Amino acid sequence: MAAASAREKQTAALKRMLNFNAPPLNTSLSEPVWKVLIYDRFGQDIISPLLSVKELRDMGITLHLLLHSDRDPIPDVPAVYFVMPTEENIDRICQDLRNQLYEAYYLNFISAISRSKLEDIASAALAATAVTQVNKVYDQYLNFITLEDDMFILCHQNKELISYHAINRTDIQDTDMEAIMDTIVDSLFCFFVTLGAVPIIRCPRGNAAEVVAVKLDKKLRENLRDARNSLFTADNTAGQFSFQRPLFVLVDRNLDMATPLHHTWTYQALVHDVLDFHLNRVALEEGPGPDPSPSGARPKRKNRKTYDLTAADRFWQKHKGSPFPEVAEAVQEELDTYRAQEDEVKRLKCIMGLEGEDDGAISMLSDNTAKLTSAMSSLPELLEKKRLIDLHTNVATAVLDHIKSRKLDVYFEYEEKLMSKSTLDKSLLDIISDPDAGTPEDKMRLFLIFFITALQPPTESDLEQYSKALTDAGCDLSPLNYVKQWKAFTKMATPANYGNSGVKPLGLFSRVMNSGSQFVMEGVKNLVLKQHVSLILLSLFVIIPAVKPLLSVCSSIPRNKNPFQEAIVFVVGGGNYVEYQNLVDYSKSKQGKKVVYGCSELFNASQFIKQVPTLAKIYTMGKKFRKM
């Protein structure tokens, strides 16, 4: 039996919390205790990708409300709180106690609460004569968000506080950097407490990743020293000191600046790149409809519809890492299959109305009654299938609109050739100067990748020519100024090799080109991906043998020199779905290997490139980190 993933363990911890920190009961055998869930934005972000409203209802949650919303008293119902231990939240909890809002209070803090804040709650409970109503107070150590079985991020709320920009801005004070690193370490500590494992930590030296590694190492050591209160020796984490402790590889975003800018071609990464997609939920703007607004009236507002892309969606789980052309074909095939099943039900209904008394007709009626009964019993499954088909038809159509209007297939293919040092069949200036090829941001992303991956930097005259073309195309050149200084600082005498990435064009689409297809793909290249090797994946092979582990606990355990079986790769400064998919593909190709991807924040190329302009220049970052 495979070990439980971080997502499964975090979900189990949440379910235990919602059952008043007791093992969840089988709800089919007994009625749950009805209760109210009170959370802040951080708690909402943690719960929403893991538990649906139906699952919350099954666990007895009748209402789920934000802590700082206006809430009416419900004096005969217990309340489960799930919040960060901030001053603002503690004050509001104390106010709830004074106002006697609920019958009982079960206080669960996402991260560890300090003694002084705990005393504030105790004083408020005492003053409100509500001491007996505060039934339990728990530190849950759940201060991270799991989006997949093998992917987690640290936060979504206030992510700008630990963003790439926050870490690399030139005017940052040492105390501010200390606070950023402590925030990251606290979340990583929570991750390993939930996982129930003490990692072997490795990282490169001289950057933010090393600072995080050293601080995490210290925090783990301090917890392990106190054997009576250690979070890694409870029953639920027993046995973690095994011969195969997880390998934890920390890398800095500055290791690879090209991949976050890269136009992608897989379904999940494309959805994140071109649509509003966060915490496994995508929002689409639907048109106002075919009827025009009356003259003089305000134009109709576009409807905004959200869809959840979760583990329960089998189509998403199967195709999220597939090239987009395969996804379009798969959606069409699913639609054709559904229509065939729907037509069969209609045909059977029609036959059921036949008349005649001959034996053949009666026999046919009997056979078709059984078939119709079978078809009707599968109707809920058929309706769910139709819902998922509609969902992915809408999402894939929205993605396709971006591909066609911005020529994203051209950008993807060209960037893959740049990163793999393949022969280019078109001039970079031609793409930048083409008014129909992409947005100014697309052009800037392409040029930055060219600049970062170039074996030789362009000459001053060439750079001036490129800069003029970019300016004429409406591009903001401040990201280029930053990347020039970043590249000079990193002293990349020979640019990093991005591996044997590349694409194989197969001409236009085959089965989805017919007139009955939902997707009119004419003019879009059918590009099949070759294995892409990002620098984050290469870090597994470069950093591991080159750097000694920072953390060594329980010296009686023999050092294992075998290759790793489970690795966690974490990017300080932000990550993306391109790197995640890269690691997923790697672990699938290596039997017995399990690789988890984590990052301080999850951004797409547009969000990343917007962080760069304000970073006008870089201090000697090595000095800044060495001071710490």
Image: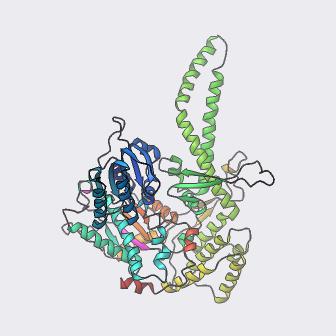
Residue 328 seen in the figure: no
Q: Quadrant of residue 94?
A: bottom left
Give the image location of residue 15, x and y in percent. Answer: 36, 48
- Residue that sits furthest to the right in the current view: 295
Q: What residue do we see at 33% from left, 74% from top?
A: 215
Give the image location of residue 126, x and y in percent. Answer: 27, 57
Give the image location of residue 317, x and y in percent. Answer: 50, 51
| 300, above or below 455, in the image | above
Q: Split into 4 quadrants, where in the image is the C terminus?
A: bottom left
- Look at the image and name its color scheme: rainbow
**Does residue 468 show up magenta in the picture?**
no
* Left or right placement of residue 121 versus residue 149 in this view: left
Q: What residue do we see at 44% from left, 46% from top?
A: 63
Please provide the residue range marked out in magenta: 237-252
Give the image location of residue 490, x and y in percent. Answer: 48, 84
Q: What residue do we see at 41% from left, 48% from top?
A: 73
